[in-house]
Image (cartoon, rainbow, N blue to C red):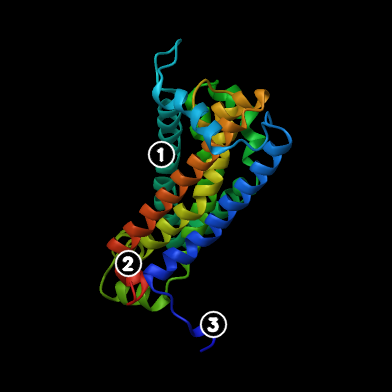
Amino acid sequence: MRWVNRRIGRGNSILLGALPIALLVLLYLVAAASRHADNPNDKILPMPGAMAEAMSALLFQPDQLSGKLLFWADTFASLQRLGIGLGISTLSALLVGLVLGVLPPVRATFSPLVTGIAVIPPIALLPILFIAFGLGETAKVALIVIGIAPFMIRDLAGHVAALPKEQIIKAQTLGASSWQLMLRVALPQAMPRLIQAVRLSLGPAWVFLISAEAIASDIGLGYRIFLVRRYLSMDIILPYVAWIALLAVAIDFLLVWSSRRLFRWAHGASH
């Protein structure tokens, strides 16, 4: 049987997916052991024991100044900013994307503006956001929204605009108004695409979040990484990066599960 025709079961899929990760971990352990054999005080590739020791203080010991468990406080702060940014972006994409996709005059008027905002590097706007909104939470959330909302709007609007014309004609024949077309025809078919757009925006959203926290913040995963880098504290940086990756994978999995659970028709009979 040709590889293109092979179908992988769920159990084998998990095993195959875990294999490259296990190989990377093994490669890291070999490289770290080699460096520590030459220099026991090496900080670039810390051993697992050193990482566990460094992280235990952040995980279980309250900070002397704030009284918080820093790891969990960083995680909560970052997830809160990310959640608010994703929520605003998703709602904006749903409302604006539907209107742009269904109404050609509105699409012709505002699509160039959305496209223009989408192609501006969001990081370049960070100084403007800090000047306009200060160094608080608003600027950090605004960076996430400006960074991902235009892409999501364009993607959803394009998907809605590409819906079969027959559906629009049939709905209008039955007396549907533009408002009913958006709610009864476009909205149900846009929801799976919206979840997909959120999934594709997760990576950039994390980039914008970490960038904002690194520049102006006193708590957060990005803040902690850039705080300890001056001490070459890879025993903290690597676990934090791994934790961010784990959180991103968990959010992505939750989105996939929700989409397949709520919109089975959009994923084919195999799901």
Identify the residue at horizontal 69%, vertical 43% (top origin).
34
Which residue corresponds to mark 1? Answer: 83
Q: Secondary structure at mark 2?
A: helix
Which of the image's four quarters has the C terminus?
bottom left
Q: Amino acid at mark 3?
A: Trp
**Front-lying residue, 161 or 36:** 36
Horizontally, residue 153 falls left or right of residue 166, namely right
* Mark carried by residue 185: 2
Q: Amino acid at mark 2?
A: Val
Name the residue nearer the viewer: 127 or 58: 58
Q: Which mark is residue 3?
A: 3
Q: Position of residue 31 (x, y in %)?
A: 67, 46
Q: Residue furthest front?
A: 37
- The residue mark sitting in front, 3 or 1, is 3
Instruction: Characterize the local packing of mark 3: few (<14), some (14-19) or many (20 or more) Cα atoms within 10 angstroms.
Output: few
Q: Could you tell me which residue is drawn at 49 percent across and 85 percent down?
A: 5
> In the rendered view, does 254 fall on the left or right side of 226?
left
Could you give the CA–CA distance between mark 3 and mark 1, rounded to whole angstroms? 40 Å
Element assignment for label 3: helix
Query: How many C-alpha atoms fall within 10 Å of the one at disc 1: few (<14), some, or many (≥20)?
Result: some
Report how far apart the C-alphas of labels 2 and 3 lie in the structure.
39 Å
Question: How far across and how far down the image is residue 60, in percent?
Answer: 39, 24
Decide: marks 2, 1 in contact (CB < 8 A)? no
Report the side of 156 relative to 269 (left or right): right
Earlier-in-chain disc, 2 versus 1? 1
SS at badge 1? helix
Q: Quadrant of residue 67?
A: top left
Q: Alpha carbon of mark 2 to alpha carbon of mark 1: how far? A: 29 Å
The amino acid on which the numbered mark 1 sits, given as a three-letter code, is Gly
Please indicate, yes or no, whether residue 180 appears anywhere in the rendered image: no
On the question of residue 24 being in view, the answer is: yes
